[in-house]
Image (cartoon, rainbow, N blue to C red):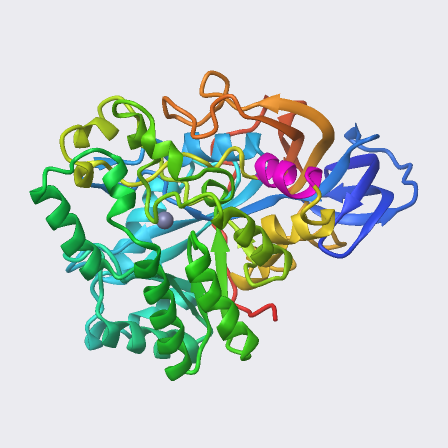
Amino acid sequence: MSKKTIVKNGRIVTAVDDYHADLLIEDGTIAMIARSIDVDADRVIDAKGRLVLPGGIDPHTHMELPFGGTSASDDFETGTHAAAHGGTTTIIDFAVQSKGQTLQEAVDVWHKKADGKTSIDYGFHLICTDIPDSRLPEMRSMIDQGVSSFKLFMAYPGVFLVDDATIYKAMLMAGENGGLICMHAENGVVIDAIVKRALTEGKTAPKYHALTRPTKAEAEGVHRAIALAEIANTAVYIVHLSCNDSLEEVTRARDMGVPAYAETCPQYLFLDYSVYEQPGFEGAKYVMTPPIREKWNQEKLWRGLQFNDLQVVSTDHCPFCFKEQKELGLNDFSKIPNGGPGVEHRMSLVYNGGVAQGRISLNRFVEITSTNAARIFGLFPKKGTIAVGSDADLVIFDPEEEMTISAATHHMRVDYSCYEGMRVKGVTKTVLSRGDVVIDEGEYVGRKGHGSFLKRGLAFSPR
Ligand SMILES: [Zn+2]
């Protein structure tokens, strides 16, 4: 006997549709969509007055990432539990190749971290730190295994940084095999020089993390990443784009028909530089890379989302506790682990700032929180939409309810929130992952190990 669930009376919204209908889910996928469905089912969920959305896809998380002598505080269990609470049903996490490791070894380590732990589905990108010519062909085998995107760093010399020739060769290899290069675009060599100089001048407070990473250093990286992709005749995806200087580079390239894609993150849409000017060590909570920028950049980024120069909102979820972890940099901002929590609140934040405040349409909201990530990273139409045959990853969302974001009530394993006290409209009520209820009216009823690894298809360019 197959398992049947019906979602009744909802307003179904995808990147292109908006209508009232019932949904029949059979064995984890959507079997039927009709004005009214009355069949015997194991469960009937009433979605009256609510939106029924494709599950959120967060293509940028770092569960259990080792960084700066410590590790991100969420693992795949706690991190996916928190993601589900916020209406995200798929994450794509970054596996990391250490120097000397083969690409296979790196991915195997990440499989071990995630296997049997997650309550929602997950995929991997692979951060490559060591790819001499002899190792480049391994990328092909990664793509065959469903790890069809790779992240390279222009920042963090000595740790993650790879040189321009390596980036170019990796782009060629990815492009020829249906893979995609994701770029951390920042001129890390110059930033390192600025950081060293600040430290010798006794500038050690958290705010100097931001003041030593100028927007031009990011924009230069974005420009160079796009130029290298043009030379290699392939697409490029810029991760965590934070400021207008960088956005202008992407916009200019796209206007010329270059397949350049970019994501931004809620922290760049909702926070501004003043977070670093708080008393004491508070600013350490916002030490992430790129840093939070001056406020005027926010409306520019929204404009980028409105006009499709930015295609995706991800979180770059990489939490470190304020106590003990962020405190590693009490006397030296350069030793503060880089990253912040975010995976839980992306959907509500973007709904509130985007749809409730009139900046974007409901369809565009779905597109930038789910559909585009699925298209770009080879998951569409299994994920990212509501259609017959697609996975029944659904979010039943109350567009009128409000909530206050707080570390006291969130589910991420971290002792602070970047949005403490912020009131948002739009709350995830019930979440289904492949037809199974993971969140039921705000209560977690999921199961560790329900989530499975997504062998992604070839990276696909949306437009
Ligand atoms: Zn990241």
Given residues 450 and 150, the one toward you in this image is: 150
- Residue drawn at point x = 54 percent, y = 39 percent: 346
Above or below, 174 relative to 305: below
Q: Is residue 352 magenta?
A: yes
Residue 180 on image: x %, y %: 43, 68
Given residues 421 and 78, the one toward you in this image is: 421
From this viewpoint, which residue is outermost toward the top? Answer: 408
* Magenta span dominant secondary structure: helix
Given residues 292 and 314, the one toward you in this image is: 292
Residue 29 on image: x %, y %: 70, 48
User: Visible in this render: residue 53?
Assistant: yes
Q: Which residues are magenta?
A: 347-357
Q: Quadrant of the N terminus?
A: top right
Residue 136 on image: x %, y %: 27, 73
- Residue drawn at point x = 23 percent, y = 40 percent: 208
Q: Quadrant of the C terminus?
A: bottom right
Above or below, 2 relative to 237: above
Instruction: Give the quadrant of residue 233.
Output: bottom left
- Residue drawn at point x = 66 percent, y = 48 percent: 365
User: Visible in this render: residue 452?
Assistant: no
Q: Is residue 386 magenta?
A: no
Horizontal placement of 246 versus 323: left or right?
A: right
- Residue drawn at point x = 20 percent, y = 76 percent: 134
Instruction: Give the quadrant of residue 207.
Output: top left
Instruction: Give the quadrant of residue 107.
Output: bottom left
Above or below, 208 relative to 457: above
